[in-house]
Image: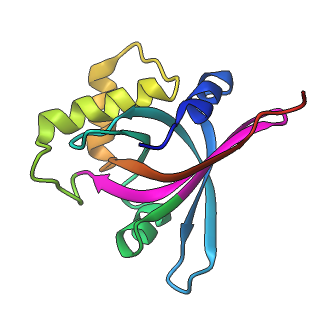
Amino acid sequence: MTDLSPFEALVPLDHGLCVVVTRRPDGSPHATVVNAGVIPHAFADEVAVAFVSAGSSRKLRHLRADPFAVLTVRVGWRWATVEGAATIIGPDDPHPDVDDERLRTLLRVIFEAAGGTHDDWPTYDRTMIEERRAAVLVTPSRVYTNPGPA
């Protein structure tokens, strides 16, 4: 199992803000910013870097065609990068082991792992449904870091 502790240690220091890179159909990189955190994988015996994305986002379209992602979290000169295979779980990307209730819970777990809090969970849940939000779980195949100045 790949050690995600360097990545996980940086998440709470800046709201889990990460750059995520996916590949466009022509193979060129597409970069955007997400809030991500480290969670137990939804149905595998391992941990994953996870984020939530709107169902209509370009990153989900890219990941559906090529399920490889790179995420970098950075705080000052310290950073950690994770590369790996992405699994999408959502209303447009159902998984046989994840029903609607488990998806609702999973989206909350990811939000909280990325440092999010909410005063009105029912409203959060409704928004996730309306925006067809999906969970993206990246199973790490490689992790590399810069621990910062000594």
Q: Residue furthest front?
A: 1
- Residue 143 lies, in percent from the top left, at 58, 48
Q: Quadrant of the N terminus?
A: top left
Q: Is residue 144 left or right of residue 126?
A: right
Residue 22 or residue 101, whichever sits in front: 22
Looking at the image, which residue is at 29% across and 45% down? 130
Looking at the image, which residue is at 45% across and 26% down? 113
Looking at the image, which residue is at 60% across and 29% down? 11
Colour pattern: rainbow
Res. 108 image quadrant? top left
- Residue 116 lies, in percent from the top left, at 49, 23
Residue 25 or residue 79, whichever sits in front: 79
Q: Residue furthest top?
A: 119
Looking at the image, which residue is at 63% across and 37% down? 17
Q: Is residue 12 left or right of residue 86?
A: right
- Residue 76 lies, in percent from the top left, at 83, 32
Chief secondary structure of the magenta portion: strand
Res. 52 image quadrant? top left
- Residue 147 lies, in percent from the top left, at 77, 34
The magenta-colored residue range is 70-90
Q: Is residue 120 magenta?
A: no
Query: What count of labels does the image hold?
Result: 0
Q: Residue furthest right?
A: 150
Q: Is residue 61 left or right of residue 102?
A: right
Res. 129 image quadrant? top left
